[in-house]
């Protein structure tokens, strides 16, 4: 039982060292992710349209 209390105490000490992001940091990171995902999606869509056009003109 003593090991459980020691584990809990050590885990709590480590959790106190964690620095959680602020709301502004979370918002900025979310916007960055959305922008990057959108750019990649547009790029892949463009590639798909180009290859589709090439494939339909060959066939």
Image: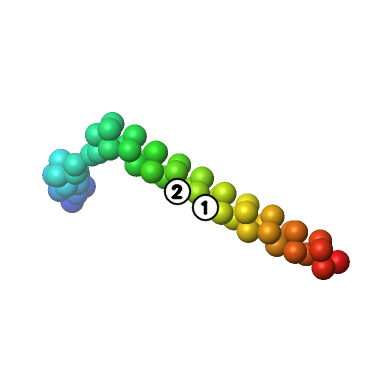
Tell me if 33 is positioned left or right of 42 in this view. Answer: left
* Residue 2 percent across, percent down from the top left: 16, 48
The answer to whether residue 2 of the structure is visible from this angle is: no
Residue drawn at point x = 68 percent, y = 59 percent: 50
Residue drawn at point x = 14 percent, y = 44 percent: 17
Q: Which residue lies under the disc numbered 1?
A: 40
- Pick the quarter of the image with the C terminus: bottom right
Q: CA distance from mark 1 to mark 2?
A: 6 Å
Element type at mark 1? helix
Element type at mark 2? helix
Q: Residue furthest right?
A: 59
* Residue 21 percent across, percent down from the top left: 25, 38
Q: Residue furthest bottom?
A: 58
Contact between labelled residues 2 and 1, with CB atoms less than 8 Å apart? yes
Depth check: give the residue in front, 36 or 23: 36
Tell me if 5 is positioned left or right of 45 in this view. Answer: left
The answer to whether residue 46 of the structure is visible from this angle is: yes
In the depicted structure, whether residue 42 falls above or below residue 58: above
Q: Residue furthest top?
A: 23
* Residue 27 percent across, percent down from the top left: 34, 34
Q: Quadrant of residue 44?
A: bottom right
Q: Which mark is residue 51?
A: none
In the depicted structure, whether residue 53 falls above or below residue 23: below
Q: Which residue lies under the disc numbered 2?
A: 36
* Residue 8 percent across, percent down from the top left: 19, 44
């Amino acid at each position: 039982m003593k090991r459980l209390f020691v584990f809990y105490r050590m885990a709590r000490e480590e959790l106190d060292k964690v620095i959680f992001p602020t709301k502004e940091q979370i918002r900025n990171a979310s916007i960055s992710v959305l922008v990057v995902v959108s750019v990649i999606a547009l790029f892949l869509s463009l590639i798909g349209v180009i290859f589709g056009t090439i494939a339909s003109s060959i066939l």
